[in-house]
């Protein structure tokens, strides 16, 4: 993003020149971190968080806590899915199709992988 893009992206948000420069630097670093066009969502999410922290609307600590909470929920959901796969029975292919996961995920859940 160039300076014009940063201004357009910020819209009505008030930012000092230093904050705009910091957001520009973050944008450059984030673009280098995720250059693949398929990673646009990750770049967007990272830039949003960088801007919120830079502008004082969010903190690193709060975002880290949200990430830890999300990981805990993911682990609980994975355990629940594993239990459901084990309890459901059927072929690996059928279980994978029904659960929307790969056959290797099913094999792992069944203790075969």
Image (cartoon, grey):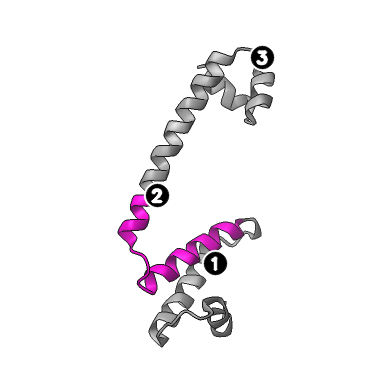
Dot 1 falls on a residue whose secondary structure is helix
Q: How many marks?
A: 3
Residue 1 in the image: state x and y as whole percent.
57, 76
Q: Quadrant of residue 19?
A: bottom left
Answer above or below: position of 46 versus 54: above
Instruction: Please report the bounds of the magenta region as a residue range.
Output: 39-66
Q: Which residue is mark 2?
A: 67
Q: Which residue is mark 3?
A: 91
Answer above or below: position of 96 versus 63: above
Q: Which residue is mark 1?
A: 31
| Badge 2 or badge 1: first in the primary sequence | 1
Answer above or below: position of 51 versus 65: below
Disc 3 crowd rating (10 Å Cα; few below 14, some 14-19, many 20+) is few
Mark-to-mark CA distance, 1 and 3: 43 Å
- The answer to whether one can see residue 53 in this image is yes
Check the image and name the residue furthest to the front.
12
- Between 73 and 35, the residue placed more toward the observer is 73
Task: Residue at 60% x, 12% y: name it.
Answer: 89
Dot 2 falls on a residue whose secondary structure is helix
Task: Residue at 41% x, 77% y: name it.
Answer: 22
Residue 5 in the image: state x and y as whole percent.
58, 80
Mark-to-mark CA distance, 3 and 2: 35 Å
């Amino acid at each position: 993003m160039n300076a014009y893009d940063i201004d357009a992206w910020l819209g009505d948000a008030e930012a000092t020149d230093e904050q705009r420069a910091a957001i520009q630097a973050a944008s450059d670093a984030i673009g280098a971190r995720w250059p693949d066009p398929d990673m646009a969502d990750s770049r967007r999410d990272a830039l949003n968080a960088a801007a919120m922290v830079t502008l004082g609307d969010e903190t690193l600590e709060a975002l880290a806590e949200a990430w830890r909470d999300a990981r805990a929920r993911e682990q609980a959901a994975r355990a629940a899915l594993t239990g459901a796969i084990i309890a459901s029975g059927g072929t690996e292919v059928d279980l994978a199709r029904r659960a929307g996961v790969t056959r290797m995920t099913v094999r792992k859940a069944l203790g075969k992988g």
